[in-house]
Image: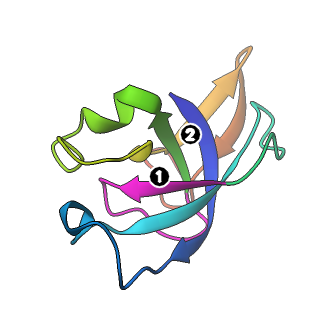
Amino acid sequence: MLLAKIVGTVVSTQKEPSMDGLRFMLLQPIDPDGKSAGNHVVAADAVGAGTDEVVLYASGSSARQTVVTDKRPCDAVIMAIVDQWEVGGKIKYRKHGAPGV
């Protein structure tokens, strides 16, 4: 699993029929400090995430192992919305409205 911030949406009216019904989001991978780390990724959204949220995503064959992406030609999937993370006992990120806020 990898960390990323959702920076936008991708709309495709014509696509492989098995992809119908999927929402596509544009992700910016981030490092443990929340800084950009790598190229943008388009991912199918399996959890109802939205723009500006920090998420966990999987890529490659793992992306086809969610209920939403099973047997679909998908190379990246958002599988969790991050509430917070910490490194070395220091909170690096906490979503507004997350438990404990």
- Residue 88 at what x, y percent from top left? 74, 14
Answer whether residue 33 is visible to the viewer in this image.
yes
Q: Tell me whether the residue at label 2 lies in contact with that at label 1, contact meaning CB atoms closer than 8 angstroms.
A: yes
Residue at (81%, 40%) from the top-left corner?
Answer: 37
- Please identify the quarter of the rendering in which residue 38 is found: top right
What colour scheme does the image use? rainbow
The magenta segment is 41-53
- Residue 39 at what x, y percent from top left? 76, 48
- Residue 31 at what x, y percent from top left? 77, 34
Amino acid type for the residue under numbered disc 1? Ala
Between 42 and 53, the residue placed more toward the observer is 42
In this rendering, position of residue 47 left or right of residue 36: left
Residue at (32%, 47%) from the top-left corner?
Answer: 73
> Could you tell which of marks 2 and 1 lies nearer the N-terminus?
2
In this rendering, position of residue 5 left or right of residue 92: left
Residue labelled with disc 2: 84
Q: Is residue 25 above or below residue 60?
A: below
Q: Is residue 63 above or below residue 16?
A: above
Between 19 and 23, the residue placed more toward the observer is 19
Cα separation between marks 2 and 1: 8 Å
- Please identify the quarter of the rendering in which residue 29 is found: top right
Residue labelled with disc 1: 98
- Please identify the quarter of the rendering in which residue 84 is found: top right
Residue at (52%, 74%) from the top-left corner?
Answer: 10
Amino acid type for the residue under numbered disc 2? Gln
